[in-house]
C-alpha cells in the first residue's frame, strides 16, 4: 500500500512516500509549515498517487489512543488540544486540513505521539494535584515523541538480537525537542515529557523540568499573560537561553574553543540527561539497552560518549571506534547492556499504524 507520510515539526516538515516499508522518496521541506508547504505536499500527492496521507499529530489527549481516519471530530479535538502543544498541533492540523482540501477524496490518517504512552502505569501518569484538576482539565503525564520511541525501541531490539518483550530499554530521542522513554519488555512505563512537551530534558528553546514556583514568580513580577508566558517557555528558554543559540552542535563546538558560556550550557544539558537516564533505568529495575535517536542523538558521537561517561554503574559503555562509525549500530563493547544508535524513522512507524487503521475501516465495510 502506497502512503504519503507528513511529519510537521516546529521548524520543518518531513515527508516520505512509502510502498509498504520500501522508501520511494524522503524529503524535508524547510521553514515552519505553511500554505506553500501544503502546496508542495499536494504536488507529491499528484506525482505519487498514494492510497492515503498520514499525519503526525503531537498531542492526542486522552481520547485518541491509536491512529484514526480523520473526520470532523478528530479535527475538532486536535484543535482544542493546541494550547498544550502550541508549536506542533496548529501546524500539523493546518497542513492536514490544507492537504485534505487539495485531495478531498483521499483518506487522511492521524497518528498521535501521545498514543504510545496512553497506558502508562498510574504511578507514572498521575501528578500530585487536586482531583478536580485531573478530572476537569485532563492533567496527567501524556508523554511525547511516541512514534520515535516506538520505532527506536523495536529496532534496537533487532540490533541486539533479542525480542522486544525480553528487554528493558531506555530510548533517548534527542533533537530540537528531546525526551526519554522507559520501555519495559515492550510496554512504556515512564517518560520525561509530561502534560505538555515543555517538561523533562533541556531542549533547543524549551526549558525542561521547572519548579512551578518559577512560573508563578515570573507571572507575578512581570504581569505577563498566560499566552506571553507560553511564548517565552516554548521559544526563549533551553539552550537558547543558556548559550544564545538553540543549536546543540554549535554549543559543543564553542565549548571546544573554550567558550565558558557554551561549556556551562553543555554541562547543564548533560547533567539533566544523565540523571534522567538513571531515573528511567530505576523505573525498570535496570537497563538492557540504551538507544540514541533523533537529530542530535544520531549525529553527535561526543554527546553519546559524554552522556554515557558517568553511567558505568549501569554497565553502559561506549566503544570509541563504533561510536564514530555511521548507520544503525551497537556502539557498546558488549551486547548487553548495550548502547545503540538508530536513525529516527517516524515515517515507518506512522505507515505501520496507518495501515492498521485503514484495514480496520475496510473490515467494517459491508
Image: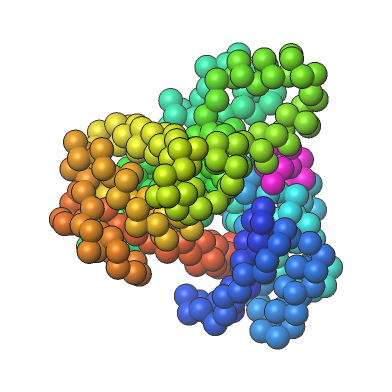
The quarter of the rendered structure image containing the C terminus is: bottom right
Percent across and percent down for residue 115 are 54, 47
Q: Is residue 17 above or below residue 129?
A: below
The residue depicted at 74 percent of the width and 15 percent of the height is: 221
Q: Give whichever of 256, 184 is nearer the camera.
A: 256
Looking at the image, the residue that sits furthest to the front is: 258
Q: Is residue 235 above or below residue 92?
A: above
The quarter of the rendered structure image containing the N terminus is: bottom right
Percent across and percent down for residue 315 are 18, 43
Please identify the dominant SS of the magenta region. helix
Q: Give whichever of 178, 74 is nearer the camera.
A: 178
Q: In this view, does 364 lie above or below 199?
A: below
Q: What stretch is highlighted in magenta?
A: 77-87
Q: In which quarter of the image is residue 16?
A: bottom right
The residue depicted at 42 percent of the width and 44 percent of the height is: 258
Total marks placed:
0
Instruction: Report whether 22 appears left or right of 333.
Output: right
Instruction: Report whether 82 appears left or right of 161.
Output: right
User: Is residue 92 something that shows in the picture?
Assistant: yes
User: Is residue 119 something that shows in the picture?
Assistant: no
Looking at the image, the residue that sits furthest to the left is: 334
The residue depicted at 31 percent of the width and 34 percent of the height is: 278
Q: Give whichever of 276, 242 is nearer the camera.
A: 242
Q: Quadrant of residue 231?
A: top right
The residue depicted at 67 percent of the width and 15 percent of the height is: 217
Instruction: Report whether 358 appears left or right of 95.
Output: left
Q: In this view, does 127 lie above or below 322?
A: above
Percent across and percent down for residue 123 are 43, 25
Is-magenta flag for residue 323?
A: no
Q: Give whichever of 137, 220 is nearer the camera.
A: 220
Percent across and percent down for residue 161 are 22, 62
Amino acid at each position: 500500500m502506497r502512503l504519503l507520510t507528513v511529519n510537521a515539526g516546529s521548524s520543518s516538515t518531513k515527508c516520505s512516500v512509502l510502498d509498504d516499508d520500501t522508501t520511494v522518496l524522503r524529503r524535508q521541506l524547510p521553514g515552519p509549515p505553511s500554505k506553500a508547504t501544503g502546496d508542495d505536499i499536494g504536488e507529491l500527492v499528484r506525482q505519487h498517487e498514494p492510497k492515503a496521507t498520514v499525519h503526525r499529530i503531537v498531542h492526542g489527549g486522552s481520547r485518541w489512543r491509536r491512529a484514526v481516519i480523520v473526520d470532523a471530530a478528530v479535527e475538532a479535538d486536535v484543535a482544542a488540544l493546541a494550547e498544550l502543544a502550541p508549536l506542533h498541533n496548529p501546524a500539523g492540523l493546518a497542513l492536514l486540513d490544507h492537504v485534505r482540501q487539495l485531495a478531498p477524496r483521499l483518506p487522511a490518517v492521524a497518528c498521535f505521539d501521545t498514543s504510545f504512552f496512553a497506558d502508562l502505569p498510574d504511578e507514572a501518569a498521575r501528578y500530585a494535584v487536586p482531583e478536580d484538576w485531573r478530572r476537569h482539565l485532563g492533567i496527567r503525564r501524556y508523554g511525547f515523541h511516541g512514534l520515535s520511541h516506538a520505532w527506536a525501541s523495536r529496532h534496537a531490539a533487532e540490533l541486539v538480537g533479542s525480542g522486544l518483550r525480553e528487554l528493558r530499554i531506555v530510548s533517548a530521542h534527542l533533537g530540537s525537542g528531546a525526551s526519554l522513554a522507559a520501555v519495559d519488555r515492550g510496554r512504556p512505563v515512564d517518560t520525561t515529557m509530561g502534560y505538555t512537551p515543555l517538561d523533562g530534558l533541556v531542549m533547543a528553546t524549551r526549558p525542561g523540568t521547572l519548579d512551578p514556583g518559577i512560573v508563578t514568580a515570573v507571572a507575578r513580577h512581570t504581569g505577563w499573560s498566560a499566552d506571553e508566558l507560553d511564548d517565552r517557555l516554548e521559544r526563549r528558554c533551553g539552550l537558547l537561553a543558556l548559550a544564545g543559540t538553540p543549536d546543540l552542535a554549535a554549543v559543543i563546538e564553542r565549548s571546544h574553543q573554550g567558550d565558558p558560556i557554551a561549556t556551562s550550557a553543555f554541562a547543564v544539558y548533560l547533567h539533566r540527561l544523565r540523571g534522567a537516564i538513571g531515573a528511567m533505568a530505576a523505573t525498570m529495575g535496570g537497563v538492557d539497552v540504551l538507544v540514541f535517536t533523533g537529530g542530535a542523538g544520531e549525529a553527535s558521537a561526543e554527546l553519546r560518549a559524554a552522556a554515557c561517561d558517568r553511567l558505568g554503574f549501569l554497565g553502559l559503555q561506549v566503544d570509541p571506534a563504533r561510536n564514530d562509525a555511521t548507520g544503525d549500530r551497537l556502539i557498546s563493547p558488549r551486547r548487553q547492556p548495550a548502547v545503540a544508535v538508530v536513525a529516527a524513522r517516524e515515517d515507518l512507524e506512522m505507515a505501520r499504524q496507518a495501515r492498521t487503521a485503514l484495514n480496520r475501516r475496510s473490515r467494517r465495510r459491508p
